Image (cartoon, rainbow, N blue to C red):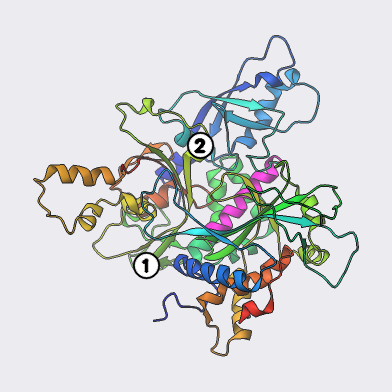
Amino acid sequence: MANEAVKYVWEGAIPLQIHLHKSDVASHPSPPPALVLAPRIGYLPLLIPHIKPYFKDSLPPGEDSIWFDYKGVPLKWYIPTGVLFDLLCAEPERPWNLTVHFRGYPSNILIPCEGEDSVKWNFVNSLKEAQYIINGNCKNVMNMSQSDQEDLWTSVMNGDLDAYTKLSPKLKMATIEDEFSRKASLSSPQSRQGATEMDVAGQIKTARVPVRLYVRSINQDFENIEDVPGIDTWDDISYLNRPVEFLREEGKCFTLRNAIESLLPEFIGDRAQTSGEERSRDDDNTEEADGLLREMGEIKLARIQGIEMKLEIPFSWVVNNLMNPEFYLHISVLVKAPQR
Amino acid sequence: MNSGREVSDGRLTVEGFSVAARAFADKWKIHNQSFPPWSWVPLINRTLHLSNQQEEGYLSLEEILILSSLEESPEDESLNVATDCLEKEESVDHTILVQNQENEAHYYDFHIVYSSSYKVPVLYFRGYCSGGQPLSLDVIKKDLPSCSVSLLHESKWTFITQEHPYLNRPWFKLHPCGTEDWIKLLSQSSISTGCQMPVDLYLVSWFSVVGQVVGLRIPLEMLN
């Protein structure tokens, strides 16, 4: 049931320009940077077989322990490449300039990575967690045969959407009812018969959706997005690995804004009313209204799969079309912090 | 009102976790005085929250000095914890120190963190030397009592290296999958009213099992 949006997501890629860190350069002259096209849904360690040939003649003797940094910030290898890009580059940089290290792994900051095995293991664990959130248990992933699990992982590694689409039904993930996707798929051979028909996994009314929210908070407004300063450390990012829970109600649309606000309640738009109950609701009282606005934070930007999202989009559409292969929706958010 | 006061499916809400955590910390303080108390660390994130409406947080027990006894006593399955734990401000006289296999002092931090995905508590821990260098899992396993090492081999319990959900550093955690199943079993055997377990007792019961894996035992009085 691959639709346009899912294809777009799987084909998304970031051009990288990868520089060897000067302390790892044992040759003269130092090697030119490697140019690699990195799949958005992939992970940096998977690129190493493509990168290493460029640099192997320049490396000092010894064992490799490979890691990447962007402007001095070590990159967390288990975060999909596209998410790292959306989060760390306020203004998208093309190509994205990264530095690769072959020595001196910062094991006090980054969890260890033993190449593809670590990345696969992380993927499967995220998949289990996502399934637990969606289905209430992770038995389908656990019961999947070893070879099916391997094939699923391989399809992700190779960006093979066709192979993935054949295998993912074995996961029997419950789906979120979504009027918008269904319209598009009515013309496809696998279209659903009607609104009330249940598929194998069942469509659910109360949804628990796996979300990973990455929040960058700034204290002031910026004219241009490129003026937003980069982060110095990961402590500048708040990471929330927490499901969005929502009840599907007739006639009501649960939007992306609703979803983000449910995870970050201090940004809720109507907070002004609840906190201002003792005050007059007269909007002419602009001074007080300004004061209240300053107390609230503001969602400046939300990026998913490189797209700057309109917050009023129905959340169910976003989930069904923009999630990653492990069934997590990764959202990078830029917020202006509440002011005192 | 049943909501929040009792647990029947082995899982906790985030509010239930806060309640259970305070109850656990209080009982620990009363009954387990050979250890320092657990502290509650609220999740007031400096980049986001002005006021944390619904206080979320985790329990923290830190700088536990772990020693390996030179005389093996198989009956004693708990860690030999130094009765003086290192205070941040004070310098402590370690006259009762017994050297461990590495010939240096090992410190351990334990955090009990709520998992919103699995709706159960998860134990995170790490070990480090006095210089702050992290200890590897091999070294940590040597510090743990031998019974937990065999528990690990049953692969019921797995230690995973994973980033701490809030601290941006690698920690170890005990994999939570399956927690709600054995919590349900615990509640069946201890309370006559089916699978109900009062929220206050959740973490105490949970820790009576989980703590053993890392060699932290709790006195039986805590379970009352």
Residue B87 is one of the magenta-drawn residues = no
Q: What's the amino acid at mark 1?
A: Lys
B191 or A206: nearer the eye? B191
CA–CA distance in space, label 2 to label 1: 32 Å
> With B69 as the anchor, is A141 left or right in this view?
left
Identify the residue at horizontal 60%, vertical 35% (top origin): A44
Q: Which residue is mark 2?
A: A84
- Residue A322 in percent (x, y) is at 43, 46
- Residue A101 in percent (x, y) is at 67, 27
Nearest to N terminus: mark 2 or mark 1: 2
Screen quadrant of the C terminus of chain A: top left
Q: Residue furthest right?
A: B71
Identify the residue at horizontal 11%, vertical 48% (top origin): A283
Q: Is residue A7 visible?
A: yes
Q: Is residue A170 visible?
A: no
- Number of numbered callouts drawn: 2
Chain on which label 1 sits: A
Identify the residue at horizontal 69%, vertical 42% (top origin): A112
- Residue A142 in percent (x, y) is at 64, 62
Q: Which residue is mark 1?
A: A205
